[in-house]
Image (cartoon, rainbow, N blue to C red):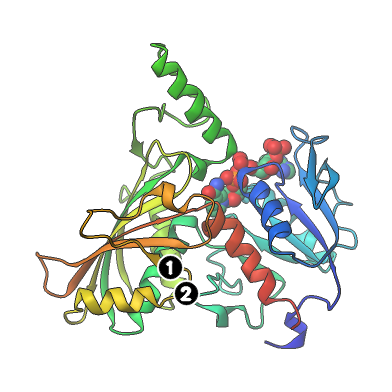
Amino acid sequence: MNSTDLLPNRPLKVAVLGASGAVGEELLSLLEERNFPIQELRLLASPRSAGQIKTFKGKEIEVIQVSDKSFDGIDLVLASAGGDVSRRWREVIYSHGAVMIDNSSAFRLEPNVPLVVPEVNPQALCNHHKLISNPNCTTILLTLALAPLAKCLPIRRVIVSTYQSASGAGARAMQELQDLSKDVLDGLTPTSKILPYSLAFNLFLHNSPLNSSKYCEEEMKMINETRKIMALPNLSLTATCVRVPVLRAHSEAVNIEFSEPFPSAKASKVLSNAPGIELIEDVQNNRFPMPTDVAGRDLIALGRIRNDLSNPNALELWLCGDQIRKGAALNALQIAEMLLPS
Ligand SMILES: NC(=O)c1ccc[n+]([C@@H]2O[C@H](COP(=O)([O-])OP(=O)(O)OC[C@H]3O[C@@H](n4cnc5c(N)ncnc54)[C@H](OP(=O)(O)O)[C@@H]3O)[C@@H](O)[C@H]2O)c1
C-alpha cells in the first residue's frame, strides 16, 4: 500500500457516526478491546440519542447530534447510520480530509470504492480514495467460506438461503423481538412497529424492496457484492433471505457447485485452515454450528460440509456468524487497522 493510502502515524481522532445503534455500540467495544490508537473519540447520532452517555476506556463521552462541525480535525469516520445519512455526510467528511469506512450500502457498488473483506480481498484497499465500503453482513460471512474454496477449484454456481437474526435490522428490532416474545408468552397479540411483522415465534422473507424479478434488495446485495469482492463478475449466485426469531448472529445454508468434484474431506481441511473460520463438525454427536456458538465472537463457524447427493460437482455447508461483529463492526475495524502505518 502507498504511504498516501495510510492513516497518520499518531493516535487518531475518530468519529463514530451512528454511535447509539447496534453496529455503533459494537464499534465502541471493539475500539476499546482491540486497543485501536485513539487520541479523541467523537460519538455522533441523530437528535433522538444526543445527550446519551457512553463509556469508553473508563471515560464518559456524550453522544452529540451530527452537524457540519462534527468532522473538524477528524482522521477517521466509522459510519453506521444508514445509507441516507452516509450520503448526506460523504462530501463534508471528504472535505475535512478524513477517511470514511462506511457500513451502509450507499457506495458499495461504486467502481472507485473498495468493498473489502480483509481475509478475502485485502488488495482492493490499495489506492482507495478515502472512502471504503464495508460489505453487507450476510455477504461478508458467505465470502469468508467461498474464497478459500475458490482458490482450489473454480466455482460455477452458488445457491444460498439465509436465516437472519433480528439484530440485522438494528438495535430497536432486537428490543422488539424481546418485547413481542414476552407478549406472545403472556397470551397477548404481538404488534410490530419496527419490523413489518412480528418476528416472535415467527419468520418471514426479508422485507427489503423487491425488483421486477421478485428478488429483494438483500438478495441482490449478496449477488452483486459477492461478485465484486471475489472479482468474479459473472459468478452465478442465487439467494433467498429470511428473517428468523434469533436475537443475534445470522446463519446460511450454502450449496457451491465447482467445475469438477470437490471431496468434502478436502474442503473441510481447506476451510479449517482458512482465516476467520472455525469448524464445528461433531458428526458423532450430530452437533454443528448454531447462532449461540458465535454471538459476540470474531470467528464464523462452519460445519456439515458434505458432498451434494444430487450433484457430483457440488458441496453443501452450513455457517453461522455474528453479523454485528464480523458482518459489520469488526470487519470495518479490521479495514481501519490495515490502514494504520506499521
Ligand atoms: N445490524 C447489522 O447487523 C448490520 C450489519 C451490517 C451493516 N449494517 C448497516 O449498518 C448501519 C447501521 O445499522 P444498525 O443495525 O446499527 O442500525 P441501528 O441500530 O438502527 O442504528 C442506527 C444508528 O444511526 C443513527 N442515525 C439514524 N438516523 C440518523 C441521522 N439522521 N443522523 C445521524 N445519525 C442517525 C442512529 O441514531 P439515533 O439513535 O439517534 O437514532 C443510530 O445510532 C445500516 O446502514 C445497516 O444497514 C448493519
Position of 200 relative to 26 (above/below): above
Alpha-carbon neighbours of circle 1 within 10 Å: few (<14), some, or many (≥20)? many
Q: Mark 2 points at which residue?
A: 275
Find out if the beta carbon at label 1 lies less than 8 Å from the nearest ligand 1 atom: no
| Amino acid marked by disc 2 | Pro
The residue shown at (27%, 76%) is 267
Q: Is residue 312 left or right of residue 290?
A: left
Report the Cα–Cα distance between label 2 and label 1: 6 Å
Q: Nearer the viewer, residue 87 or 186?
A: 186
Q: From the viewer's perspective, is residue 129 above or below residue 342?
A: above
Q: Is residue 235 visible?
A: yes
- Residue 280: percent from left, percent from top: 34, 61
Q: Residue at x 83, y 69 (%)?
A: 97
| Res 107 visible | no
Query: In the rendered structure, which amino acid carries the disc numbered 1?
Result: Ile
Of 159 and 105, nearer the camera is 159
Say whether residue 126 is left or right of residue 46: left
Which quadrant of the rendered structure holds the N terminus?
A: bottom right
Viewport quadrant of the C terminus? bottom right
The reply to whether discs 2 and 1 touch (Cβ–Cβ < 8 Å) is yes
Estimate the x, y position of residue 101 in percent, counting from the top left.
Answer: 67, 63
Question: Please, what secondary structure does the residue beneath circle 1 have?
Answer: strand
> Image quadrant of residue 71?
bottom right
Which residue is labeled 1 in the image?
A: 277
Identify the residue shown where x is 31% and y is 78%. Answer: 269
- Secondary element at tag 2: loop
Question: Where is residue 175 drawn, in percent x and y?
Answer: 55, 30
